[in-house]
Amino acid sequence: MTIKLPKWAKRFLSENMRYKVAYGGRGSGKSWNIVRMLVLKAASNKTRILCCREIQNSIKESAHKLISNQIDELGLSSLFSITENS
């Protein structure tokens, strides 16, 4: 499977830094591309990843749906345990 990512996204995870923060405007694909990269990283190496995003009223309004959609789209559902609340 070939996964296309923008150049900035490839550099983002390849840089060897403990903390990384993505800045930019709405609609630039930051969340989508970063989640995709992190799902692939977690699938290839047993890794614990913390994703922080602005506070929402519920898990359904947060990045949960985006992360679970990427896991499904990449065909990696068997490697992850997705619940409604976490």
Image (cartoon, rainbow, N blue to C red):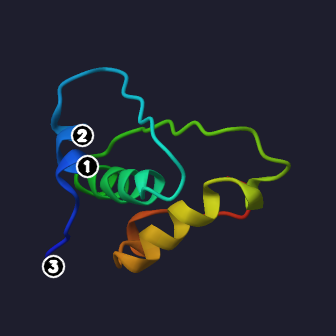
Residue name at image x 38 percent, y 50 percent: 34
Q: Circle 3 — which element?
A: loop
Mark 1 to mark 2: distance in Å?
A: 7 Å
Q: Nearer the viewer, mark 1 or mark 2?
A: 1
Across and down, in percent, residue 67 comes to 52, 61
The numbered mark at residue 66 is none
Across and down, in percent, residue 20 comes to 36, 28
Q: Is residue 74 above or below residue 12?
A: below
Label 2: which residue? 13
Mark 1 touches mark 2? (CB < 8 Å): yes
Mark 3 or mark 1, earlier in chain? 3
Residue name at image x 20 percent, y 71 percent: 3
Which of 32/24 is in front?
24
Disc 1 marks which amino acid? Ala
| Residue at the outermost front position | 25
In terms of image quadrants, where is residue 2? bottom left
Q: Circle 2 — which element?
A: helix
Q: Is residue 64 above or below residue 76?
A: above
Label 3: which residue? 1
Disc 3 marks which amino acid? Met
Question: Would residue 20 be seen by someone viewing this image from the given angle?
Answer: yes
Q: Nearer the viewer, mark 3 or mark 2?
A: 2
Residue name at image x 37 percent, y 22 percent: 19
Label 1: which residue? 9
